[in-house]
Structures are given as structure tokens and as C-alpha cells.
Amino acid sequence: MVDMSVNLGGLPMKNPVTTASGTFAAGMEYSDFVDVAALGAVTTKGVSLNGWEGNASPRIAETPSGMLNSIGLQNPGVAHLKEVELPWLAQKGATTIVNVSGHSFSEYVQVIEALEDAPVDAYEVNISCPNVDAGGMTIGTDPNSVTEVVGLCRAATNRPLIVKLTPNVTDITEIARAAEAAGADALSLINTLMGMAIDAERRKPVLARVVGGFSGPAVKPVALRMVWECHKAVKVPLLGMGGISNGTDAVEFMLAGATAVAVGTANFFNPHATQETIDGIYAYCERHGVGRVADLIGALEC
Amino acid sequence: MGLINETVQVVSNQQVGPRLHLMVLDAPAIAAGIQPGQFVHMKVPRMEAHILRRPFSVYVRDVEAGTIDILYQVVGFGTDHMTSLQPGEECELIGPVGAVWNPPAQGRCLLVGGGVGAAPLFMLCESIVASDASVDVVLGAQTEAALVCRDRYAKLLGDEPRCATDDGTYGRAGFCTSLVQEALQQAAEEGAPYDYVAVCGPEPLMKIVAGLAADAGVRCEVSMEKRMACGIGACLSCVVDTVDGKKRACVDGPVFDAGKVVW
Ligand SMILES: Cc1cc2nc3c(=O)[nH]c(=O)nc-3n(C[C@H](O)[C@H](O)[C@H](O)COP(=O)(O)OP(=O)(O)OC[C@H]3O[C@@H](n4cnc5c(N)ncnc54)[C@H](O)[C@@H]3O)c2cc1C
Ligand SMILES: Cc1cc2nc3c(=O)[nH]c(=O)nc-3n(C[C@H](O)[C@H](O)[C@H](O)COP(=O)(O)O)c2cc1C
Ligand code: FES
């Protein structure tokens, strides 16, 4: 028996695997493939106060071993999440992380306040979305803004507060330290990398928004490097993601310093990817005589 | 039925027209459950760097044999690569996905298929033929050799579908929209107007036919093609603008009430 449990900054997880926000909705759509209660946690799609329409189509492009998206945080608003998805997750027995977005500092706080009486186990504050003009990445690239918004969110809740970082910065450890100092219980990384795809025949961008967020297996080396850098720079636990498709990928992130991991784009090509990742981590631990999965965290030998 | 991710085998895979290929897949579970209008989301083997699945409608299904046929046009890397799949090779299909066509139980129906859009209408045509409603079919293609569904429709209907080719090599020369306009007009003049139009094909064609149906006061449904990542409603890649806001082509569609689509 391998002890698969981990603790992500005060959030107990039965295993280290959650879903990357925006790739799994709240899990209902995947319920023919995945038992949400078997996951370490479900991380829901980014939610704003009153809902957003998102960007124009086309919203995705396939790129070598990856994809671009410019969904633009389309969501129906926090009231809908409370009414429909959160009760469903609670009834299924899932551990729930709600990904919070906002166009302004106060919107993040208002979303958290609206969720305080709902069945939520932790918040993931998205200050890293490249697909919106206000909020998102514009906050997450400036240490002063990070300090301010994380401080405000911290004051609004006693629940575990995870802050999601963007890779689109010169030095991610600077942002990581700012978030930690402002009261984050854990950090998640990475959100998508800014990218672009061009249709040469038509001399047009593939995405209506021209640029979008790059994800999938192609980004894994960048994500691993950033998890490793942050692991050395901060004490709070890390939720690693970026290109994780199976148990081996997940173990690599844990060795680099992640306490938990998220499966994102892989859900699109393999609807069983989350459960297979859990099974793969378990099999790795058995094969290597690892009794507690937590012993893998930061166990890279270099 | 719920969704499944079925590992299926290629039975045959042959070119049937210019850039047009027919793949028969041994997919008993999906064949048993799929309804007209629904599609499958295919993970094509041996193209790992192209990570996304490809969505395809089901052209023909044979519940007894447990097979489904996909008629596909080569338009890019994935569909080109699909032509290399050999009998016996395995791929994965998520299905059956999506909303179904909603023809009336009785009355007159007109189906309009442009290019490869003739395929997703065939199962609908079968179900209408088996019902108390009647059905006429208009097919359009670039050239005669591309009218690859014509024979099957003719056999099902016991009559030739009305055809148009852009180059005039078969049927009416030009776009099939003129045939649609005439059919709508003639039916109205006969005092037996259509009750329903279903159209599938390039978006400009669907938009024109939707407009003609609206002018004639006939209910119309369209099948929308959008780029899809998850294919099951989770990622919001595939949204269609409608009067009720953005809707997901994969699970709220692909079939939409044409009157609600904001083109
Ligand atoms: C519900 C539905 C049913 C369909 N049924 C059929 C069918 O029966 N026969 C058929 O030939 N085609 C059908 N299509 C279109 C088919 O999915 C695309 O032609 C195919 O995905 C192109 O892949 P590619 O790798 O060759 O093109 P590439 O351009 O290399 O593909 C790059 C990316 O764009 C996507 N893409 C490109 N063109 C389209 C398109 N027109 N629609 C959706 N995604 C696209 C691909 O899936 C891929 O993710 C259907 C599309 C949808 C949404
Ligand atoms: C279609 C799509 C939608 C996303 N939506 C969100 C979101 O709403 N909030 C967020 O914090 N991250 C969002 N992300 C980023 C992912 O959660 C994740 O950080 C990123 O995709 C890297 O992981 P991956 O390579 O495993 O997908 C989205 C990613 C994709 C592909
Ligand atoms: S393709 Fe993901 S929601 Fe339609």
C-alpha cells in the first residue's frame, strides 16, 4: 500500500492529482469517464462575479505537441456555480478548488466573499490568464499588484488560498515570493504561455484574438523548470502543471518540488487522463519502493 | 446513452472521390447508440504531435454489423494522415456526442447537403423515410465525381435526389441554393409547403439556406462546424453565437435551430 495523500497548504488531498482549471469544467461533462470523488481535487473553471462572454471564435489552434486557446474566461458567474456545480461536486463527495478570476482587485474579493458559505475546500486565485484585457496576467506580472491582490484575498478568507502564477515573466521566483509574503498558502504554476499561430495561406492569425495561451505536452520542460525554481525560492507548497499527461509526467513535477499536480490539456485527448495519472503515480511508487507519495516532493537528485 | 471512449478497428478505408474517403469502423457500442445528428470525436493513431481529436459525423451505421461509416474530406494534416490508416488499425472514438436533428413527426421535410455535408444528413433521411413524414433531398458538390452520396440517397428514396454541381458536370449548374429556392417556392405554390428544412455544409451555404427557409416561414435546423478540443462540453472552444448567448457546438449542438444562430 502506498500512502497517496498530500497536504497542499492546508488542503488535505487523498492523492496529488487535480484538474487544471478550464480543462475539466466542474467535472459533470467528464462524469461518464471519471469519478470526481476519486481525484485529489477538482479545480473548477475560472469564475467571475457576474459572468463573462469570452472571446470571439476561432478560440483554439493546434500546434506541435500542444495547443493555443483564447477562451477568455467565459463563465456564467459565481451564482450559477453555487447553484449548479458546487452542490453537484459536494453530493459526489469531491474535494473542490474554485478558480477565481476578476477584472479588478475588488472583483476577486467579491467572488471569494460570495463563495464563503458554499461547499468549497480551497481557492485558486488566477492572476495569470493571458486571454483577458483587464485583470488576469496584467496583475500577475507585477509584484506590487500581486502583493495587493493576494493580501486582499487573504483577508477575505481563512480557507486555503492558492495563487496561480503566469510563466510570462522574466523571473517567476520574484512573483512567487511576493505571493507567499502576501499570505498565499500554496502556489500553482504554470498558467499558459503566450503564443501565436499563423495561417500563411490566408495571411491571417488562426485565433480571432490573434494571440492565445499555449499548453499541452510541448510546455512541460518550461513548467518543470519553473516549478523547480520556485521550489528553491519559497516554502509554501506548489501545485505543478503544464503538459502533464500521465503518471511519469506527474512524478517528474513532484521530484522538481510540486506537492500536487494538475492534469489539463491531456483531458482533451484522453478523457481518462486524470485517473490514469493517479494510477501511474501509484505504480511508480510501488516500483520504486516509495511508501508515501509525499516523499517524492523535491526528491530530485542533482 | 452516456458517452463512451471506444477502441475501434478500421474495417476499410478507401478513396471514393476527389479528396473524399470513406472509412468503415468496427464500433459496435457507438453504432448501437448513435442518433442522427450526433458525431464521434476521433483520436487518430500515429500522429502524436497533433494532440487534438478530430470530430466526424456518422454517415451510415449498421447496428447488426456493429459498424459506422465516416465520409471525410482531406483538408489538413489529420485528414490527410487518416488516409494512411490500414484495415485492422485501432483508433479511439468518444461518442455518441451532441444534439440530434428534430424533424416533425408528419409533414414535408427538405434536406440540403453541400459537399461532405451530405453525409451527416443520411441517417436523418433514413429516419424520416421510416416515419409518417415525407422527404426531398437537395445535394450540391463541386463536380460530379464529388457527389459520392447520390447513389445511396437514390436507393433510400427510390428516386434521384436533386443535384447541383458548381462546374455543371451533373444536374443543375451552379450552387444548390437555386434548387432549394425552387423547391420551397414550388411546395408553397402546390399548397403543401415544407414543414422543416435541415442543412449541412459550408457555413455560407447554411446561412443562405437558413435565410431562404426563414423567408418561406419554414423551420430550419443547421449543423455547425467549430474547432473542438474536448468535444464533450467542458472547454468552451467550440462556441456558436446564438440569440440566447454563446452555445457549445459539441453538446448544445452541433444541430441548432437556424433561427437562433447569429451568423
Ligand atoms: C460536429 C462536426 C462534424 C464533422 N463531420 C465531418 C464529416 O463527416 N466529414 C468531414 O470530412 N469533416 C467533418 N467535420 C470537419 C472535420 O472535423 C475537419 O475537417 C477536421 O477536423 C480537419 O482536421 P485536419 O487535421 O485535416 O485539419 P487541420 O487544419 O490540420 O486541423 C487543425 C485543427 O483544426 C481543426 N479543424 C480544421 N478544420 C475544421 C473544421 N472544418 N471543423 C472543425 N474543426 C476543424 C482540427 O480538428 C484540428 O484541431 C466535422 C466537424 C464537426 C465539428
Ligand atoms: C482551454 C483552456 C482553458 C483554460 N482556462 C483556465 C481558467 O479558466 N483559469 C485558469 O487559471 N487557467 C486556465 N487554463 C490554464 C490551465 O489551467 C493550465 O494552467 C495550463 O493549460 C497548463 O497545463 P496543461 O498544459 O496541462 O494544459 C486553461 C487552459 C486551457 C487549455
Ligand atoms: S469542444 Fe470543448 S466545449 Fe465543445
Image (cartoon, rainbow, N blue to C red):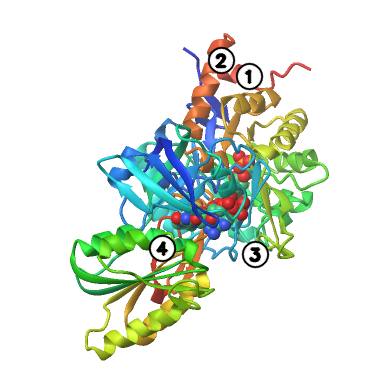
Circle 4 marks a residue in which chain?
Answer: B
At x 60%, y 28%, the residue is: A250
For this orientation, the residue located farthest to the top is A289
First in sequence: mark 2 or mark 3?
Answer: 3
Residue B10 lies, in percent from the top left, at 44, 37
Identified by mark 2, the residue type is Cys
Between label 2 and label 3, give the one nearer the viewer.
3
Residue that carries the numbered disc 3 in the rendered image: A208
Q: Residues within 10 Å of mark 2 (few under 14, many from 20)?
A: many
Q: State the CA–CA distance, disc 4 to disc 2.
A: 52 Å
For disc 3, does the CB lie below 8 Å from ligand 1?
no
Q: Judge depth for marks 4 and 1 and give the one in front.
A: 4
Q: In the structure shown, which secondary structural element does the residue marked by tag 3 occupy?
A: loop
**Residue A109's spot in the image, x, y percent?**
58, 55
Disc ID at residue B118: 4
Q: Considering the numbered disc 4 on the image, is that residue within a helix, a strand or a loop?
A: helix
How many C-alpha atoms fall within 10 Å of the one at disc 1: few (<14), some, or many (≥20)?
A: many
Nearer to us in this view, A268 or B11: B11
Quarter of the image for residue B154 reads: bottom left
Q: Which of pointers 2 and 1 lies earlier in the amino acid sequence?
A: 2
Cβ atoms under marks 2 and 1 closer than 8 Å:
yes
Of all residues shown, which one is farthest toward the left? B132
Neighbourhood count class around disc 4 (C-alpha, 10 Å): few under 14, some 14–19, many 20 upward: many
Q: Residue A285's mark? A: 2
x, y percentage for residue A102? 61, 58
Q: Seen in the image, is B49 located left or right of residue A18?
A: right
